[in-house]
Image (cartoon, helix red, strand yellow):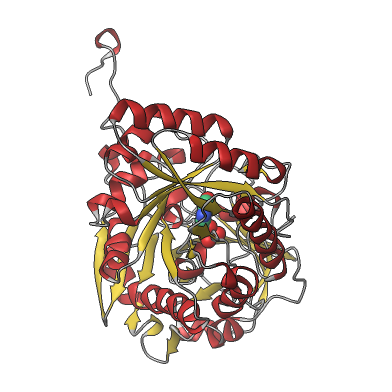
Amino acid sequence: MADDVTFHDPDPSVAELLASRPYLDMDPLCGLMLDGVALNDIADKVGTPCWVLSGDTLRARMHRMRQAMQDAGLNASIYYAVKANDHLAVLSLLREEGFGADIVSGGELARALKAGIPAHHIVFSGVGKSDAELEQAIGLGIGQINVESAEELEIISSITSKLGKQATITLRVNPDVDARTHAKITTGLAANKFGIPYDDAAALYAHAASLPGIRAAGFSTHIGSQILSVAPYRAAYARIADLVRTVRAAGQTVDVVDCGGGLGISYRNEPEGQPEALAGAIRAELGGLDVRLAIEPGRWPVGPSGLLLSTVILNKSRGDEAPFLVLDAAMNDLLRPSMYDAWHGLVPLSPHDATLAAIPTHVVGPVCESGDTFARDRQLPPMQRGARLAILDTGAYGAVMSSTYNSRPLAAEVLVDKGTWHVIRPRQPQDALWQDERVPSHLAGTA
Ligand SMILES: *Cc1c(COP(=O)(O)O)cnc(C)c1O
């Protein structure tokens, strides 16, 4: 199965990829530009592989989400899902624009606070929060905890009692709705580990309201990621609305419905998820409930805002068969193709390369795994050793999933913003690879 299970049209050409991404532009002299900045300039100075993220595009996409909610007449808070891209520069940019954060670990909580996002603008999600993480979050006065099990509810109540604090919670309900996305990013089916079974939610909510140290504020849900149609959202929200009416009829108070994230983007020019359509689904199902609403977008705002620059190490020809284009980027940098069979657009940086007739090409990284493959039989202009290309739509679940497998240092990261660019993470030096390793004295050599 692929990320793009519902989409079988032929691969878009380089020209088609560029035409549908207004923040990208092929300048006849400078080559590929991201929001007015020449990517060759960045690669010349910083080298490759290098992640480049456009703050301008990220800001514009977050504003579009906020505007869509406002235009639908919804009172909605927007909590950016930190796990999609947790760089401090990203979080700082979003804090400046007044957005909150959705976090899934103590590390993400610390990052969000470090970027200046106040604790009361932070929502804590996740199926397995440790006692230490909960104590940290509750002690800091976190805005909301999305509780994923009856067991977790009891743990939170005992921690609030111990700390003499109150915690505002929602119950994350698993609506048993198929988001029709990749199996590894579906979360709203009864078979998934996430959330509280729908049929248990009303009784557990009444119990939550009775527990000391707990303020039961409402419900949350999150049905998966890379969701391209609003139908599964509507189905999930309709079930949540029923639940709200049920528990209210039983005398409970409900102030909040957190609608989760998951809106999908256009990796191969399939129509992307529309914030306006999502807002419409929320309004249709939840708009009349007189609750404060929330969404938790991650991939949609940040995914298209970023790309990964790479250089062709060599073009390995194989007679009549498709050549292997071996890049200096690999699966340790961008895991998505090997993990989710993800399709990413590939665009040469050179305006000349971009115009050559395309031929079928396999694009791979140098890591010692056959899974280290970015594309098979991709129609690409022939590119030679030293040519550069951009791997598109890698701003979300890209750099955050990197590892140093094969002792490959973490790639550099650059932020393009307001017509200029900044290194936001220098390439990791080689000796940083082992700086935290300790060799017992009886094994220490002469190095
Ligand atoms: C991952 C996650 C999100 C963000 O999902 P995207 O598909 O990146 O929008 C939102 N809420 C929760 C609870 C998540 O786990």
Task: Pick whichever, 382 or 143, lies toward us.
Answer: 143
Task: Pick whichever, 206 or 178, lies toward us.
Answer: 206
Taking the spot 26% from the left edge, 38% from the top edge, the residue there is: 431
Q: How many marks?
A: 0
Question: What is the quadrant of residue 9 in the picture?
Answer: bottom right
Taking the spot 27% from the left edge, 42% from the top edge, the residue there is: 140
Residue 428 is at least partly visible in this image: no
Instruction: Specify whether 339 is left or right of 427.
Output: right
The C terminus sits in image quarter: top left
Which x, y percent locates residue 22?
47, 86
Image height of 265 relative to 101, above or below:
below
Image height of 368 relative to 56, above or below:
above
Taking the spot 37% from the left edge, 68% from the top edge, the residue there is: 53
Image height of 291 relative to 439, above or below:
below
Which x, y percent locates residue 275?
55, 76
The N terminus sits in image quarter: bottom right
Instruction: Specify whether 27 is left or right of 178.
Output: left
Question: What is the quadrant of residue 106 in the picture?
Answer: top left
Instruction: Specify whether 281 is left or right of 97.
Output: right
Task: Pick whichever, 86 or 168, lies toward us.
Answer: 168
Taking the spot 72% from the left edge, 48% from the top edge, the residue there is: 189
Residue 98 is at least partly visible in this image: yes
Which x, y percent locates residue 39?
36, 75
Residue with the most extreme bottom position:
28
